[in-house]
Amino acid sequence: MSLLSVRDLTVTFGDTAVVGGIGFDLPKGGSLGIVGESGSGKSMTSLAVMGLLPRGAARGGSIVFDGTDLCALTERRMRAIRGDRIAMIFQDPLSSLNPYYTVGTQIAEAYRSHRSGVSRRAARKVAVEAMERVHIKEAGRRVDDYPHQFSGGMRQRVMIAMALSTEPELIIADEPTTALDVTVQAQILDLLAEVRRDTGAALIMITHDLAVVSEVADTVVVMRHGDVVETGSTEQIFSDPQHPYTQALLDAVPRIDDEIGDLRLLSGGEA
Amino acid sequence: MARYLVHRVFGMLVVLFLVSLFTYMVFFLLAPDPAVQICGKTCTPERIDQIRANLSLDDPFLVQFLHFLQGLFLGRDYGTGASAVHCSAPCLGYSFQSAQSVTDMIVQRLPVTAVVAIGAAVLWLLAGVVGGLISAVREGRFTDKFITSLTLGGMSVPNYVLALVLQYVFVVWLQWLPFPQAVPFADDPAQWFLNFILPWTVLAVGYASSYTRLTRANVIDTLGENFVRTARAKGLRPDLVWRRHALRPALTPIVTIAGMDFAGLLGGALITESVFGINGVGKLAADSITKNDQPVIMAVTLLAAFFVVVGNMAVDLLYSAIDPRVRVGAAS
């Protein structure tokens, strides 16, 4: 049985649909890449799963997580799942951390809000352990530091530690490496892979970067203008793309052995 | 840090010096002859000359001003010989009206004004922050519109109108509050406290209104921040998201403004104190202006300037205490 099964998901702002009835499945412990350009609806899809759509957005269809339709849950019951069984990692780790609290407080906060009767001290210990698991050196000391005292890659490690602390079954990472430089990107991807090996968590990786997808995902969903244009195993998508848009996306990736030619333009209309 | 402090204190002294020089100049040039004023109705030219000599009123402006500064820091003597009166530092001179030491007058009234200011500040901070937070999280809904209407009213109504209306409603009509009568705190704490309820409220209404607007705007800003989305993604209860993650960053500018407003009020709330007959620095200022009591006006002006300047500096120091990005150095 799938851990997550999305059917006919729509996200609309008034009359405008930004996600137009998409579907995909994610098995337990599996990993799914959602690729697409800016405005393709990939981030809205992830926020719809979290139930964190911005005000004014409406959600339709069904999102079945471990047998429960998230769309049918009350906000209160959704809150119990959010951050506990499904955790999310965002793009810009500096602005995603509150500058007024220590990283330890912010990691412990996620844990404490889902486990009743956890003392401050026990939660702090959980935070230190989570920081050690994401390889932050001297975690016992740095737990009391503020986000601005960390480098970009370290901040993203803090975000991952926060997501880890509750041992979620599903981690949704929305462009987690986009704001980081290339060597740090590779470290963060390695870390995510390690986390999945250790905890067995499933992963949805949302990105515009095909290289990232090829590294972490078993299955790839290609999105454009709010629709899924192609779904397949990572191998199949990269070796034998069916849809012209997917082919164009792959062609747009610069390769070291390429001859330099004109940039291929993608048509703007519905492909 | 030490260097910064020295720099600030020096700047503070310059501002205070200029304020006192300017105030002294205004009253020196514009005020009617104080000797005539002091002398009263039964007056002889000899008497006026004597007063002028005692107060050194015939000296040039700068000499008089220097004497004033000398009195402030070192103390000074009025008159000469056996009739000389010593006024020890900080000497602000003697009232032209009552011949009391101005320093004593201020020292007597300052605690009253402090009570007025502290009570009002507590009220307006509570009302402003809570009202602003509620308004922000209900943005665009009825509650928000209702609170916004209240704040518009609160900002528009003049203090003296509000004071009279509230006095009429609560003291005369509903009789929920006793008729105000001056009592020292020690004699009748209950009456003392009840006396201050209306002044605190009247003074707080205007501030509370603008603080509500300010808190609302700041919280709406922080609600759009990515870290608020992170807090929601953790599954935090909405009230915790609002209080911890949206309100906390929004409070920093509010604390700084509150510090300056409070300091300004320590210089006296002229209208409120006068309307309620509270013997604070504000009423002293109002009275001395109507009676053209130059030394007293000079003193309350300087006092107000002093509080504003010190308040400004305190707020700057406070800022570093409440914002970890200022308090703790950058990335290590």
Image (cartoon, coloured by chain):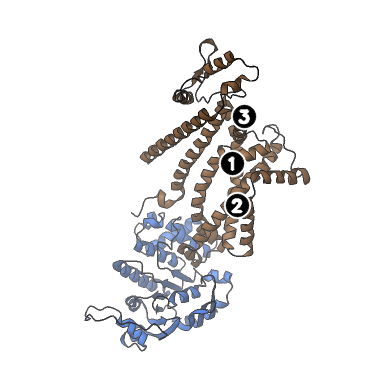
Chain colours: A blue, B brown
Mark 2 belongs to chain: B
Say which residue label 3 marks.
Answer: B291
Q: Residues within 10 Å of mark 3 (few under 14, many from 20)?
A: few
For marks 1 and 3, the one nearer the N-term is: 1
Question: Residue B233 at what x, y percent from top left?
Answer: 49, 67
Q: Please state which of the two labelled residues, at mark 3 or mark 2, is closer to the viewer.
A: 3
The label on residue B118 is 1
Furthest-top residue in this view: B82
Q: CA distance from mark 1 to mark 3?
A: 29 Å
Q: CA distance from mark 3 to mark 2?
A: 34 Å
Q: Where is B93 relative to B257, above or below?
A: above
Figure quadrant of the N terminus of chain B: top left
Describe the element under mark 2 as helix, strand or loop. helix
Disc 1 and disc 3 in contact, CB within 8 angstroms: no
The answer to whether dots 3 and 2 both sit on one chain is yes
Q: Position of residue B221 (x, y in %)?
A: 50, 60
Please, what is the three-letter code of the amino acid marked with disc 2? Ser
- Quadrant in which residue A14 is drawn: bottom right
User: Is A113 situated above or below B272?
Assistant: below
Residue B268 in sight here: yes
Q: Nearer the viewer, residue B25 or B5?
A: B25
- Residue under label 2, please give it: B209
* Separation of marks 2 and 1 at Cα, in angstroms: 17 Å
Which of the two residues, A260 or A148, is positioned nearer the viewer here? A260
**Foreground pick, B298 / B106:** B298
